[in-house]
Amino acid sequence: MPEGDYILQSFEQQGDPLPFSCRNGCCTSCAVRVQQGELDQQEAMGLSRELRSKGYGLLCVARAIGPLVAETQDEDEVYDLQFGRHFGRGSITREIPLEELETWKE
């Protein structure tokens, strides 16, 4: 793979499809876990610094820095790690009057 190219794009050009969805680094469809090597993924908005430090990457906006070994991940697992702590806590309250929104708490 040419250095500096996006990993997902390079694989597609070689005829090797990988999972993806947004191509903007916002979702987790193209998530991988780096086993060896390092990624440059400054544009990965959909991945926290914490997950990046644990070796997760988003192939649509990642470039390999030297040799790389990575394993594709379950999209739902990575999505839950990234966003799960913010969604799904408790029950959903519907139809809250606008005047109550300022004082409404979980």
Image: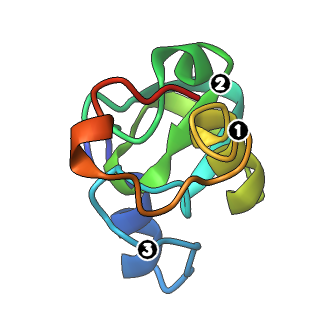
- Residue 34 visible to the viewer: yes
**Viewer-side label of 2, 1:** 1
Task: Tell whether 1 sits left or right of 76.
Answer: left
Q: Quadrant of the C terminus?
A: top right
Pick the residue in front: 42 or 94: 94
Task: Tell whether 70 sits left or right of 10.
Answer: right
Assign a secondary structure to mark 3: loop
Residue 96 sits above or below residue 4 on the image: below
Query: Type of residue at label 3?
Result: Ser
Residue under pointer 1: 89
Pick the residue in front: 98 or 28: 98
Residue under pointer 2: 55
Q: CA distance from mark 2 to mark 3?
A: 20 Å
Residue occupying the point 31% across, 52% down = 97
Task: Tell whether 89 sits left or right of 94.
Answer: right
Which tag, 2 or 3, sits closer to the chain's start?
3
- Location of residue 80 (image quadrant): top right
Residue occupying the point 72% across, 59% down = 76
Query: Type of residue at label 2?
Result: Gly
Circle number at residue 21:
3
| Residue 103 x, y percent position in the rendering | 36, 23
Which tag, 2 or 1, sits closer to the chain's start?
2
- Location of residue 70 (image quadrant): top right
- Residue 70 visible to the viewer: no
Q: Mark 3 and 1 residues: CB-CB less than 8 Å, in contact?
A: no
- Location of residue 99 (image quadrant): top left
| Residue 3 x, y percent position in the rendering | 31, 40
